[in-house]
Image (cartoon, grey):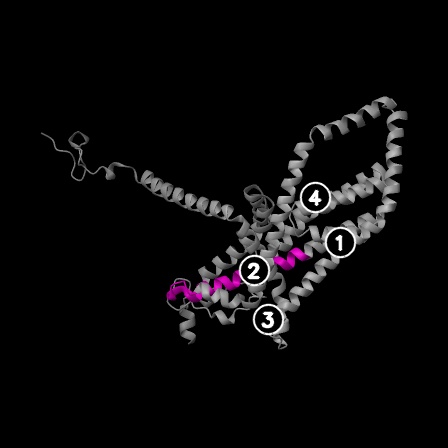
Amino acid sequence: MSQPPRGRRDPSFLTESTDITGLVPRGLRVAAALGWRFIIVIAALYAVVWLMGYLAAVVIPVSIALLLSALLAPAVEKLVQIRFPRGLATALVLIAGLAVLGGLLTFVITQFSSGLPQLQVQLNNSLTQIKNWLTDGPIHLRQEQIQDFLSNAIGFIQNNQASLTNTALTTAGTVGEILTGFVLTLFVTIFFLAGGNQIWTFLVRGVPVRVRKRVDVAGRRGFASLVSYIRATAAVAVVDAVGIGIGLWIVGVPLVIPLATLVFLGAFIPIIGAVIAGGVAVLIALVTKGFIGAIIVLAIVIGVMQLESHVLQPLLLGRAVRLHPLAVVLAIATGLVAAGIAGALLAVPLLAVLNAGIRSLLHEHNPDPESVDVLHDQAAQPNDAEPGSEDAEVPTRGDDEEK
């Protein structure tokens, strides 16, 4: 009776206790191992994202405070270098920052208020022209039809008064949440600027001693990348304000400077800031320059926004935080889909911090945390690897002969 080849089992002799692992193709086993590990990683990431969403009222203010700290930290360090106490330097920088922000907002509101009477006159003239066009133009509407339309609009508002009231209450609640978040953001920013180094040192103590220095340097380089991101964002905001301001000046729209200031402030808030600032500019152009002027201003705003989205942000931000332009665009899109405006605001900074930190962890094996300038240097040094490690440079035979 013939026997099966040695090393192979006859399937007819398999029992319930027989190990069948060897019968599964190796490719299928590798795919299964990768598959369940991938599922666990995705589940862990989903849990982290869900937790961050659940704690959004805390996570978002802390994240914005970290961005503000990256913006204001260079000024604080300058004052500390000229022998100002850190607490006093923090207070001076925060007061100056709030004064600048309050001054810009006050300037915008004051200019709009002073120009409001003229805008009202021009609005009345524009409404009269629109009414004349509706009655005498190609549409040839009757006066009764226009009056019926206005009556229907007023009736709609009266019939939906309860819904509008609930919307107003919801908006008031949202304003309250925003004010609470602003206070928390300011509070956290003060502590980040005054004792950020001590806070980071305390957190690093929870890391095993064997890799503590590498994690410390990775975090410092991540914050340095955040500083570079804030500077690039400010440059993009300036370009937006100047571009739209010049366009409004050429068209002859009034309130050019306050509108440009509003564009500058709005550029720091992705998507919604540009939409609001551009919408205000288009409405003022519609009132003062008519339909054609509004179309021209809309084209200018769209052109500048396209320049920002497809050229300035990918190139300036990509160069500042050492990210590929495609990665910047995809990060903004992913953040917007995952968490709305807050996600779009925080996606690129988070990606920049992770990129700088991971690059540092991979390449720096014996770093000195005190040698890292967190305000200017976010580049990992691949040549600083420990001798004997995988990333250490192996001397060639020619180098040995020279030595």
Residue 362 % position (x, y):
45, 59
Residue beneath disc 2: 188
Disc 4 designates what residue?
275
Q: CA distance from mark 3 to mark 4?
A: 38 Å
Q: Which of the 4 image quadrants contains residue 294?
A: top right
Q: Which residue is mark 3?
A: 87
Q: Which residue occupies the foreground of this view, 272 or 307?
A: 272
The amino acid on which the numbered mark 1 sits, given as a three-letter code, is: Thr
Specify whether 17 is left or right of 196.
left
Front: mark 3 or 1: 3
* Amino acid of disc 3: Gly
Residues shaded magenta? 205-234
- For numbered disc 4, what is the local secondary structure? helix
Q: Position of residue 169 (x, y in %)?
A: 64, 40
CA separation, marks 3 and 2? Answer: 14 Å
Q: Which residue is mark 1?
A: 261
Question: On the rendered structure, is 130 left or right of 54?
Answer: right
* Location of residue 325 with respect to 391 vertically, above or below: above
